[in-house]
Amino acid sequence: MNVAGTATAAALTTLAAAHAGPALAAIGPVRRRLMPALSGIGDPGHVALTFDDGPHPEATPRLLHMLDANRVRATFFLLGAMTERHPEVARAIVAAGHEIAVHGYEHRLLLKRRPAETLEDLARATAAITAVTGQQPRWWRPPYGVASTAALIGARRLGLTPVLWTCWGRDWTPNATSDSVFRAVRRGLAGGGTILLHDSDHSAAARSWESTLGALPAILVHCRARGFTVGPLHEHGLRRLDNLRQPVGV
């Protein structure tokens, strides 16, 4: 390879690293150690309860009823396309006192999208969710928890703070059960943590959300037994600007 070819290859490698660098934050142990705010680590006496991929016409209303019965509020990371498809469900989330956030317009891996496509997706999702719900989102979580540099820049421009999670229920899998979801959350849960669950099977096994609904009562009992208050991200003690200043490759 000649000098020009070597330089071109090096430049392409640098660009690829810059684009994909933030994806390292998807590695849980690395993220929790080096980027606690991005991981959703907040007040040690509080646990943030979050749901991705909705709104769903059947799962979300049932979840809202369960949360209301337990006097718990949560944060819902909505997809723009699902919000436009089920606007009445999205509005019901806000009417019930919950917080809405952005998950993207479509549930697609951002590393496979060009920067312009990424920025368009984020802007379209934020506009759709704001227009339907009347609530300006504060938070953003990339699909699969994998961000790109373009996505982080777009989030900053839109006033969105990225936040991921400290534990999840693995409730999207075809073999998930209420017990397996509960045990997965329990293993990873600590004070100040953020729980990731799903109120939709949009990007998961069919009707996987039934396991989530089945596990939620036990999760709430477990949190209360350990003395944790459960609530949305805006009550979790996260500092918005600090999240964006985490060393995630920007």
Image (spheres, rainbow, N blue to C red):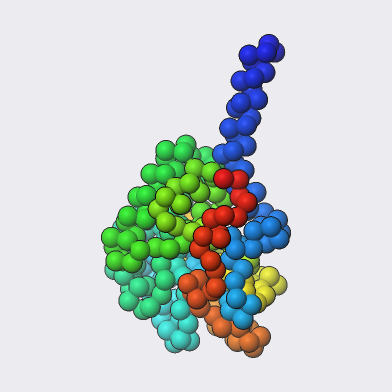
Q: In this view, does 146 lie above or below 231?
A: above
Which quadrant is the N terminus positioned in?
Answer: top right
Residue that appears at 67% across and 13% down: 3
Q: Residue 209: x percent and y percent?
A: 50, 68
Which quadrant is the C terminus positioned in?
Answer: top right
In this rendering, position of residue 55 left or right of residue 12: left
Q: In which quarter of the image is residue 44?
A: bottom right
* Res 205 visible: no
* Res 77 visible: yes
Residue that appears at 68% across and 70% down: 188
Q: Quadrant of residue 5?
A: top right
Q: Is residue 245 above or below residue 69?
A: above
Q: Residue 67: x percent and y percent?
A: 46, 81
Q: Residue 163: x percent and y percent?
A: 54, 61
How many badges with numbers are in the image? 0
Residue that appears at 46% across and 38% down: 115
